Amino acid sequence: MNNALRLGINIDHVATIRNARGGDTPDPVRAAKIAADAGADGITAHLREDRRHITDTDILRLCDEIDLPLNLEMAATDEMLAIALRHKPHAACIVPEKREERTTEGGLDVIGQLETLKPFVGQLGDAGVRVSLFIEPEPIVLDAAMSIGAPVVELHTGAYCDAKAGAERDREFARIERAAAHAADIGLECHAGHGLTFDTVQPVASISSIVELNIGHFLVGEAIFVGFSASIAEMRRLMVEART
């Protein structure tokens, strides 16, 4: 098995800071370029229905100005499907979305939305967009993702990261480990992300069947103290150390 572990950098919260005051700074596209120079393997951006951080112009500029693969996080709505089909990013990660949430609170209800999600997966795949589903780390949900033709899943690591260190976190990590193994068994490409920090990334990075981590908020926050390039470089170092 290829032992490489990709790092996708989510730039949403650079846009959150920009939008809090208005204007053009800090520029999330500039952040994406810095991430590329710092060794990121891809850029992730979530275009929300209410445009609370990333905007349509940001997506257009990312497609035009960034050489790295763009992973467009999106809800399963007709509006977002049309945008994804127009821009054709490298990847589209379908996520649940509620207007009142501060951040994504959990994985997609794939089992309850099979008939809704299946045409989204099919149309994006037919357009050459690599589709992933952001899901809870449970084998039954992975089976549902497989049944509608999604080639990739991204395991929600939020419960693991939020858990108290010790037995509680160990239980959440075991869920991720089992789900990643099941993904490999049934032929799904497995990614992971949400809430990962310097303190929590290494156990997840050590799981050989996980091939990509998507990390954003923590790195943007850490950049206030050490700079964006340095925060990305340290995350990469920890990932490589865990893998080797």
Image: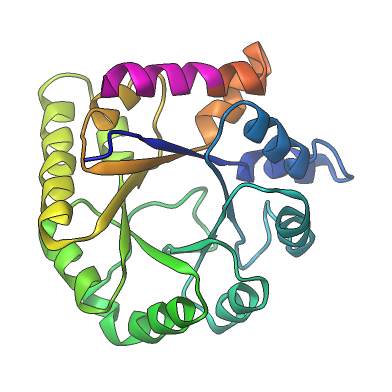
Q: What is the x, y in percent for residue 141? A: 18, 64
- Outermost residue on the front side: it is 2
Say left or right for 102 vs 20. Answer: left
Q: Nearer the viewer, residue 175 or 122?
A: 122
- Which residue is rendered at x = 50% and y = 70% of the image? 129
Q: What is the x, y in percent for residue 208? A: 21, 36
Q: Nearer the viewer, residue 176 or 65?
A: 65
Quadrant assignment, res 197: top left
Image quadrant containing the N terminus: top left
Q: Does the rendering let one see residue 163?
A: no
Say left or right for 38 vs 1. Answer: right
Quadrant assignment, res 60: bottom right
Say left or right for 197 vs 242. Answer: right
Residue 150 lies, with reference to residue 79, above or below; the image says: above
Q: Does the rendering let one see residue 85?
A: yes
Say left or right for 212 vs 231. Answer: left
Tell me where the magenta segment starts and ends, as one range.
233-244
Image quadrant containing the C terminus: top left
Magenta residue check for 138: no
- Which residue is rendered at x = 11% and y = 34% of the image? 171
* Circle count: 0
- Colouring convention used in this rendered image of the protein: rainbow
Residue 153 lies, with reference to residue 1, above or below; the image says: below
Q: What is the x, y in percent for residue 100? A: 52, 58
- Outermost residue on the top side: it is 226
